[in-house]
Image (cartoon, rainbow, N blue to C red):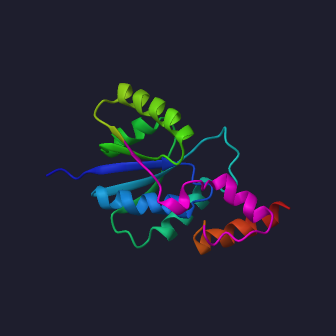
Amino acid sequence: MTERIAIYPGSFDPPTLGHLDLIQRAARMFDHLIVAVAVNDVKQALFSVEEREQMLREITATFPNVEVSSFEGLTVHFARERGAIALVRGLRVVSDFEFELSMALTNQKLDPGIDTVCLMPSEPYIFLSSRGVKEITRFGGDTAPFLPPEVSARLRKRLREKG
């Protein structure tokens, strides 16, 4: 039987407990899950690709079938290169649906052999975003309900360095 490989792509700037929730659940569904940091020069990332990969490796260390990587270019091309059968995407709110549907249909045209699997976040993470946790941290709020402790510490340090 062929190994079922999935890609969970994203910017993960920084990785949140919502991301970890989806990683944990997708890792149960597939034999091998590749959490892939997208290199996107258009977005102004707070953390480098390497730093995001390192944080993801730390928070997924207990998942034996999870690999962390990065890629440039089209997600579907990276998925094809890695032999994936699916892309995992999170749907938090209704506004995510239109974007994700459009991306799924485009990816399906580019490679009909790769499906998109959308997962709803667990209830505590429905409105959680990386942008939101940056704001909470910037104004001294408690990020414990939103970020793994090691990510929270790095985020606080990075925001202090930036002033």
- Residue 34's x, y, as percent? 40, 54
- Residue 156's x, y, as percent? 73, 68
Where, quadrant-wise, is the C terminus in this rendering?
bottom right
Q: Quadrant of residue 44?
A: top right
Residue at position x 33%, y 63% in the image: 65
Instruction: Tell me if I can see residue 31 in this picture.
Output: yes
Question: Does the magenta-highlighted stretch encompass residue 142?
Answer: yes
Q: Quadrant of residue 146?
A: bottom right
Q: Nearer the viewer, residue 83 or 4?
A: 4
Q: Residue furthest top?
A: 109
Q: Is residue 76 left or right of residue 141?
A: left
Question: Does the magenta-highlighted stretch encompass residue 12?
Answer: no
Q: Is residue 5 left or right of residue 157?
A: left
Q: Examine the rendered structure and indicate whether residue 135 appears above or below residue 149.
A: above
Q: Is residue 150 left or right of residue 118?
A: right
Q: Examine the rendered structure and indicate whether residue 119 appears above or below residue 107.
A: below
Start and end of the magenta stretch?
Answer: 117-145
- Residue 145's x, y, as percent? 60, 70
